[in-house]
Amino acid sequence: MSNTLWSKGTKATDLVENFTVGNDRILDLRLAEYDVKGSKAHITMLESIGLLTGQELELLSKELDRIAEEIVDGKFVLEDDVEDIHSQVELLLTRRLGDIGKKIHSGRSRNDQVLVDVKLFLKDEVLKVRKEVLKLFGTLQELSEKHKDVLLPGYTHGQMAMPSSFGLWFGAYAESLADDMYMLHGAYNVTDQNPLGSAAGYGNSFPLDREMTTSLLGFASLDYNAVAAQLSRGKTERATASALGAIALTLNKLAADCCMYMCPNYGFIRFPDELTTGSSIMPHKKNPDVWEMIRGNCNRILSCENEISLLCSNMPHGYHREFQLLKDILFPALEMMHKCLFMADYMLQNIIVNEHILDSPLYDYLFTVEEVNRRTLDGMPFRDAYKSVGIEVNEGRFHAEKTVRHTHTGSIGNLCNGRIREKMEKAAAF
């Protein structure tokens, strides 16, 4: 008979068990340390309300610490006939301590156990993403300052439009990450609420001290209503996926830019040969495979929020088995997010900027707006200035003065990187 917490003496067929468990056992291993942490807080609270003696608490705590060490050392495994991480921890405690181990489940359900585990896990994951985003943000700001005076063509509709600069380009993605950080902050706030004590979604008759476990586990607040706690299953994952999607969209567009700018037809940036790939037939090729993989994987991360929404959208309140599929969706996305952020930063640390792009007459028409504005500042009505420059362009008489005089807030000559840094610091204050 399998070691399931819900077993009442009958056994599911192997087909049913294999189908319903799926990848959950593998994914559960990522939650092991958090299950131990949640159990330690729970038994401390149980002792305070008289459901455990001081001696039992001491024995259970020591054994949970031992299991935690086994997890860190890579010695903890989910045995073949054990359904999930909660069952394995309780099995080990019972095997090592006897009936005392069976007392650990008093006052909780696997439903609030997994909620606690997932929330603690996601809090840590979000903090890791925050650190990685801040590192990439710093790199982008450094590049923006370093190359602030190097002009770059700007495009609208994919057509050459107006002068931009590398300072403006790098700085734009830095500020976009600051906006994404607000989303990440929001996801953290949604996650930072304690569901322990909601049990199967309706509380229970034990006089649980939920404020105590909230403090012990480091949550900022509770999911107060027991039903609302269970409603947070899926909502927490969706909030995290939404934040990841915001970051992914920023990285996706940066990657698309880099793929385009690396093309010899543009030639705006390049990378050392060892950071590009070649062709099996064309010896000249230096392909932007890293950026293409970032672009593609970020598209996949963007899909996670929608997949989670669809999974959870037609279920009434309370627990349903489909919720375990949330791990299948979100956990790989988190892993890929970490990799994409690392690789984007690594590539940008090695970027080589073309400082002479605008030497080519190909980019003369970038400066038509500059000339229109110059004539307007000299007193010519804007529409007359626009028309006169347009005529010169059509007749091939336009001569470009390749200088810019942008001084307003957020323009080429006034990047506001310091203010953007302040925005990021405010967004990342969690």
Image (cartoon, helix red, strand yellow):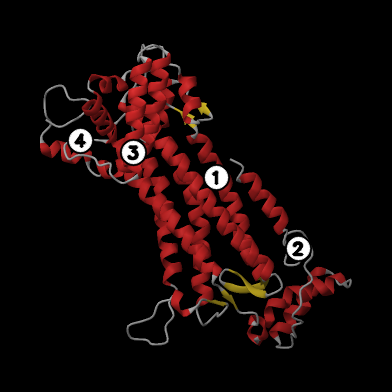
**Mark 1 or 3, nearer chain start:** 3
Q: Which quadrant of the rendered structure holds the N terminus?
A: top left
**Mark 2 or 1, nearer chain start:** 1
Going by the numbered disc 3, the residue's amino acid type is Ala
Count of number-bearing discs:
4
The residue positioned 72% from the left and 56% from the top of the image is 418
User: On the picture, is 425 further left or further right than 261?
Assistant: right
**Which residue is denoted by mark 3 in the rendering?**
32
* In front of the other: 308 or 224: 224
Place of residue 338 in the rendered image (x, y in percent of width and height, measured from the top left): 44, 54
**Which residue is denoted by mark 1 in the rendering?**
183
**Which residue is denoted by mark 2 in the rendering?**
414
Q: Is residue 220 visible?
A: yes
Place of residue 141 in the rendered image (x, y in percent of width and height, measured from the top left): 64, 61
**Which residue is denoted by mark 4 in the rendering?**
82
Mark 3 neighbour class, 10 Å CA radius: few under 14, some 14 to 19, many 20 or more: many
**Mark 4 or 2, nearer chain start:** 4
Q: CA distance from mark 4 to mark 2?
A: 62 Å
Going by the picture, which residue comes out furthest to the right?
A: 379
Q: Identify the secondary structure beneath mark 2.
A: loop
The residue positioned 63% from the left and 81% from the top of the image is 357
In which quarter of the view is residue 290 placed? bottom left
User: On the picture, is 257 further left or further right than 1?
Assistant: right
**Mark 1 or 4, nearer chain start:** 4
* In front of the other: 321 or 86: 86
Q: CA distance from mark 2 to mark 1?
A: 27 Å
Q: Decide: marks 3, 2 in contact (CB < 8 A)?
A: no
In which quarter of the view is residue 362 placed? bottom right
Q: Is residue 311 visible?
A: no
